Image: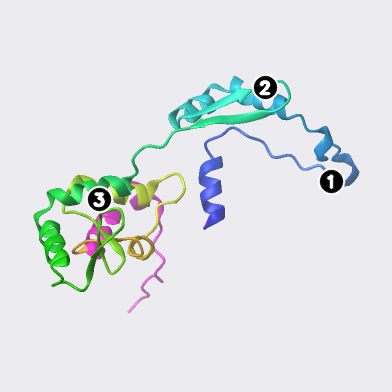
Amino acid sequence: MRQRRWLELVKDYDCEILYHPGKENVVADALSRKVAHSTALITRQTHLCKELEWAEIAVGVGKVTTQLVQLSVRPSLRHRIIDAQHCDPYLEERVRRVESGQDGEFSISTKGGLLYQGRLCVPADNDMKNELLSEAHSSLFSIHLDSTKMYQDLKCYYWWNDMKREIAEFVSKCLVCQQVKAPRRKSASLL
C-alpha cells in the first residue's frame, strides 16, 4: 500500500534512478552533499514550484541551510462535514436526541460533530459525499481502490445510510477503473 502511494506521487516527476555499485558510488556520503544546491534545483523547476505554491509551501534558499518556511492550513474536509451536519434535518434530530440522552449509538465529538459508534456522520449532501468519495478513490496517495477495500477504509472514519451501496455505485461509474481493472474470475469453460 505504501509503495503504491509513493509510486503514484513519483510518477508525475521526470526523474531518473541511477545505480552505481560499490566503490563507484562516491556521491552517497553525507559530507559531499550540498543542501543549498539541491534547493536551487527545486526553485528552477517550474512545475515543482507550482505544486509547492498550490500546497502553499514556500521554499527559501539561504547561504548555508535551506528550510521550508511556511505551511498554511485550510479547513479540512472533516471540518466542512461537521459544518454541513447543521443543515441536515436527520442529523439535527439525532443531535437533539443525543443531547436529551435518548440515543445511545450516537454521540457528539469534542469538535461538535455528530458521531455514530465513533465514526463521523456524513450529511445527505451529494456534493459532500462525492468529494469524500473522489478523494478516497482517486487522490494522489491511493490508486483507484475497488469498492470493498474503499468501504473498509472509509467505514473506520465515516458513516452514512446506504454507505456500502453508494461506494459500490461510485466505483462502478469510475471510467479509469472500467478501462484498467481486468476481471479476476476464471473464464467459463465449455459446457
Q: Residue placed at 24% from the left, 62% from the top?
A: 163
- Mark 2 vs 3, N-terminal side: 2
Q: Determine if the magenta segment contains residue 8.
A: no
The C terminus appears in which quarter of the rendering?
Answer: bottom left
Asked if the residue under mark 2 is in contact with the one under mark 1, i.e. CB atoms within 8 Å, the reply is: no
Q: Position of residue 147 (x, y in %)?
A: 33, 61
- Mark 1 vs 2, N-terminal side: 1
**Residue at image mark 3:** 82
Q: Position of residue 161 (x, y in %)?
A: 18, 63
**Residue at image mark 1:** 21
Residue type at mark 3 is: Ile
Looking at the rendered structure, which numbered label has been put on residue 62? 2
Measured along the vertical axis of the image, is residue 186 above or below residue 14?
A: below
- Furthest-front residue in this view: 100
Residue 188 appears in which quarter of the rendering? bottom left
Asked if the residue under mark 3 is in contact with the one under mark 1, i.e. CB atoms within 8 Å, the reply is: no
Q: Position of residue 15 (x, y in %)?
A: 63, 34
Secondary structure type for disc 3: helix
